Image (cartoon, rainbow, N blue to C red):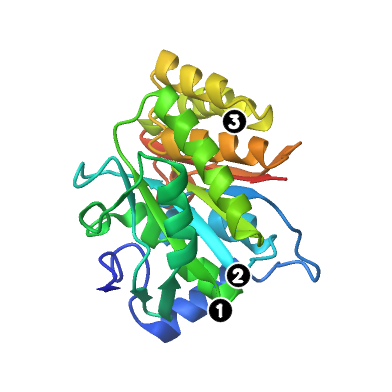
């Protein structure tokens, strides 16, 4: 199975040369010695808006041979916990092999997980992370997880199952939670709300994040992926989180009355 890109030439350049040039700009401050991490939180808007933050957070990391990217299901298609573990994903930078072993371990360790390509067919939140990963490492294997309607208990079950699956493959795995923050409020209002959600991530508090976002009506589209990643990271021994960058779409558009917030965090 080969999944073709669906938002190339929309969210990012479809021309390989133009995309590599853009990546070089986003990753120009990559440290000489990237750091190991269990997880990252990275935005998924068009690169002109959020690419700088994604590059700042992912560029700091040593990318292992296996990466799990978890994103929200914006279209509501397919299974609520949809994995693809057979075949390849294609971007303008080339093919990425899907991780059959980790995908199988994930299905074995969490009954919620279903093999399902429909949820991924038009979803941009996972796709836009892949070129950054390709620019940082050519030979990694990808496990994409698209998440739909889940309560906190579902997130807990999935997070613990993901941690067990990662332990089962007995190799380093990076988890990337793909999320944008508050949508279409003023920059001041967005920052106030997003700060409350970010505080819960920094505290490694998945239940607090889930409850804060739901309780305050924060339009953080990837709250479920981020909650799951926090649960899994804690189970894998995470002790700290760091905010790398926060900005909003107004920095690119000039419109600060209707912004989308973007945050980049590292969990170790």
Q: Secondary structure at mark 3?
A: helix
Depth order, front residue of 245/256:
245
Residue furthest out toward the right = 33
Residue at the (43%, 23%) spot, across then down: 153
Locate residue 80: give its quadrant.
top left
| Label 3, residues with CA under 10 Å away: few <14, some 14-19, many ≥20 | many
Residue 165, which numbered label?
none
**Is residue 198 among what the camera can see?**
yes
Which residue shows up at 46% across the image and 32% down it? 157
Specify the label residue 65 is tagged with. Answer: 2
Nearest to N terminus: mark 1 or mark 3: 1
- Is residue 48 visible to the viewer in this orientation of the structure? no
N-terminal label among 2 and 1: 2
Q: Which residue is mark 1?
A: 139
x and y percentages locating residue 255 in the rendered image: 39, 41
Who is closer to the viewer here, 17 or 113?
113
Is residue 233 rendered to the left or right of residue 134? right
Q: For this view, does 35 lie left or right of residue 99?
A: right
The Cα–Cα distance between marks 3 and 2, rounded to whole angstroms, is: 28 Å
Is 106 displayed left or right of 268 in the figure? Answer: left
Q: Which residue is mark 3?
A: 198
- Nearer-the-camera pick, 36 or 31: 36
Q: Position of residue 15 (x, y in %)?
A: 35, 82
């Amino acid at each position: 199975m080969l999944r073709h890109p669906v938002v190339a030439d929309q969210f990012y350049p479809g021309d390989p040369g133009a995309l590599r040039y853009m990546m070089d700009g986003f990753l120009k401050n990559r440290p000489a010695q990237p750091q190991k991490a269990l997880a990252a939180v990275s935005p998924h808007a068009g690169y002109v808006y959020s690419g700088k933050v994604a590059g700042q957070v992912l560029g700091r990391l040593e990318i292992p041979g296996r990466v799990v990217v978890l994103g929200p299901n914006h279209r509501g298609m397919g299974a609520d916990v949809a994995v693809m573990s057979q075949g390849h994903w294609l971007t303008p930078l080339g093919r990425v092999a899907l991780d059959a072993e980790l995908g199988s371990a994930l299905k074995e360790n969490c009954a919620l997980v279903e093999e399902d390509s429909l949820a991924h067919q038009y979803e941009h939140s996972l796709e836009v992370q892949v070129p950054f990963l390709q620019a940082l490492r050519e030979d990694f294997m990808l496990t994409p997880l698209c998440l739909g309607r889940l309560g906190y208990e579902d997130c807990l079950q999935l997070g613990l199952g993901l941690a067990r699956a990662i332990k089962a493959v007995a190799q380093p795995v990076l988890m990337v939670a793909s999320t944008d923050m508050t949508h279409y409020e003023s920059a001041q209002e967005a920052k106030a709300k997003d700060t409350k959600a970010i505080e819960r991530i920094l505290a490694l508090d998945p239940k607090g994040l889930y409850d804060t976002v739901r309780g305050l009506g924060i339009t953080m589209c990837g709250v479920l992926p981020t909650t799951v990643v926090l649960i899994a990271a804690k189970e894998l021994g995470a002790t700290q989180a760091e905010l790398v960058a926060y900005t909003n779409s107004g920095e690119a558009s000039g419109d600060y009355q209707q912004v989308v917030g973007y945050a980049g965090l590292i969990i170790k």
